[in-house]
Image: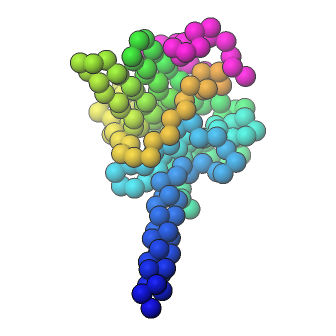
Amino acid sequence: MRISAIIIGLILSANLHAETRFESSSICTAKDKVYFSCTTKNRKILSLCGKKEGGIYYRFGKPGKVELEYPSGNIKNEDSLSLFFYNHYTRWMVDYFTVTFQNHGYTYLIQDLKNNEEETKQITQNIVIYNNPDQTDGKTISCISDVISDLRPLIYIIPCDKEAALGCSKNDGYLDSGVDPK
């Protein structure tokens, strides 16, 4: 009887653990690449995904219940690449990477900002949504857990926003050559 209770407890624990893993995963499709994904305070997930066929898309919501997908509809994979822009700035101990896109008058800014300098150590990973062209007073949705960040390959896939302050560095601090790793 006692052994049965322990086995049932272990099974329930395993099921809860599996459910937690499912909730914390990206909401990219299983066959696609995850460039960025995280869980937010309200337990929703934001994901920037790369299609195996060469496109890119953004999703926000929960597994099985995507609230926003951009671009949506029958857009060609290669056309989706021109809808997203990256900016990248790097120096010793600092790596700032952003990806922006616009949808229905809103500008979405995905940020992965890492500053490891001793006095100002800070990591910021979030999305900021602006509803005005000045990009002021945006709504910030912060990542609180389960962050996956592999934005660097995007410098060879999507265009850089040359007007943005961060610039268009392709230097990653490790591959100083700037050569496309493909």
Horizontal placement of 128 versus 173: left or right? Answer: left
Main SS category, magenta section: loop
Using the image, determine if residue 58 lies above or below residue 181: below
Quick one: which residue is furthest to the bottom in this view? Answer: 1
Residue 168 in view = no
Q: How is the image coloured?
A: rainbow
Horizontal placement of 152 versus 142: left or right? Answer: right
Asked if the magenta segment contains residue 175, the reply would be yes
Residue drawn at (52%, 52%), measured in percent from left and top?
A: 25
Q: Nearer the viewer, residue 17 or 164?
A: 17
Q: Position of residue 153 (x, y in %)?
A: 61, 26
Q: Position of residue 22 (x, y in %)?
A: 52, 59
For residue 5, which quarter of the picture?
bottom left
Q: Nearer the viewer, residue 165 or 52?
A: 52
Using the image, determine if residue 93 lies above or below residue 123: above
Q: Please state the total of marks drawn on the protein image.
A: 0
For residue 177, which quarter of the picture?
top right
User: Which stretch is magenta?
Assistant: 159-182
Which quadrant of the figure contains the N terminus?
A: bottom left
Q: Position of residue 82 (x, y in %)?
A: 64, 27
Using the image, determine if residue 45 lies above or below residue 12: above
Quick one: which residue is furthest to the left in this view? Answer: 119
Which quadrant of the figure contains the C terminus?
A: top right
Q: Position of residue 67 (x, y in %)?
A: 50, 55
Residue drawn at (46%, 50%), measured in percent from left and top?
A: 45
Horizontal placement of 140 versus 72: left or right? Answer: left
Using the image, determine if residue 151 lies above or below residue 33: above
Asked if the magenta segment contains residue 63, the reply would be no
Residue drawn at (62%, 11%), measured in percent from left and top?
A: 178
Residue drawn at (60%, 31%), measured in percent from left and top?
A: 83
